[in-house]
Amino acid sequence: MTWDPEDQITQDPAEQFLMGQLRLAYLKGKGRKYVSVLIPTDLLTAIEILLKDRAQFGIREDNNFVFATKTGHSHCSGWHAVAEVCKRADLSLPFCHCH
């Protein structure tokens, strides 16, 4: 994950406000493409914890995914993770066809 350099932030007041609430990151997409993602600043501490404690949970150092798995260079599927949580919580949501 690469953060937007601080010296490239605009002087526009609206954009400055948003940059105070959000961080712009570029995540590696498919092939050689990068995808821009806005991350709320209140999630930064959680992301830092996920990245810091990887070795403690058996995640390879060379696995660059934030939501990495223990095997190889892979990551978990967001939809499958949410579906499993819904199932375990006995929730039936429109987007969660767990039941």
Image (spheres, grey):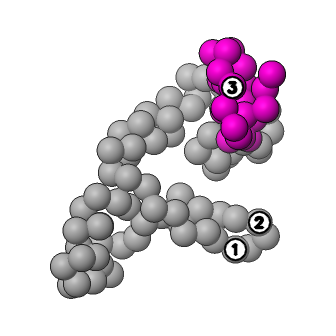
Q: Is residue 6 visible?
A: yes
> Which residue is under mark 3?
92
**Residue 7 location (% of width, % of height):** 28, 78
For marks 3 and 2, give the one nearer the viewer. Answer: 3
Separation (CA) of disc 3 from disc 2: 32 Å
Judge from the rendering whether residue 15 lies leftward or rightward of residue 27; answer left or right. Answer: left
Cβ atoms under marks 1 and 2 closer than 8 Å = yes
**Does 91 sit above or below residue 32?**
above
Q: Residue 80 or 5: which is nearer the viewer?
A: 80
Q: Which residue is mark 2?
A: 30
From which residue to which does the magenta span run? 77-99
Q: Residue at x 50, y 29 (%)?
A: 53
Which amino acid, mark 1?
Answer: Lys
User: What residue did someone put label 1 on?
Assistant: 33
Label 1 to label 2: alpha-carbon separation: 6 Å
Mark 1 neighbour class, 10 Å CA radius: few under 14, some 14 to 19, many 20 or more:
few
- Please tell me in which quadrant of the rendered image residue 85 appears: top right
Q: From the viewer's perspective, is 42 left or right of 20?
A: right
The question of residue 84 being in magenta is answered with yes
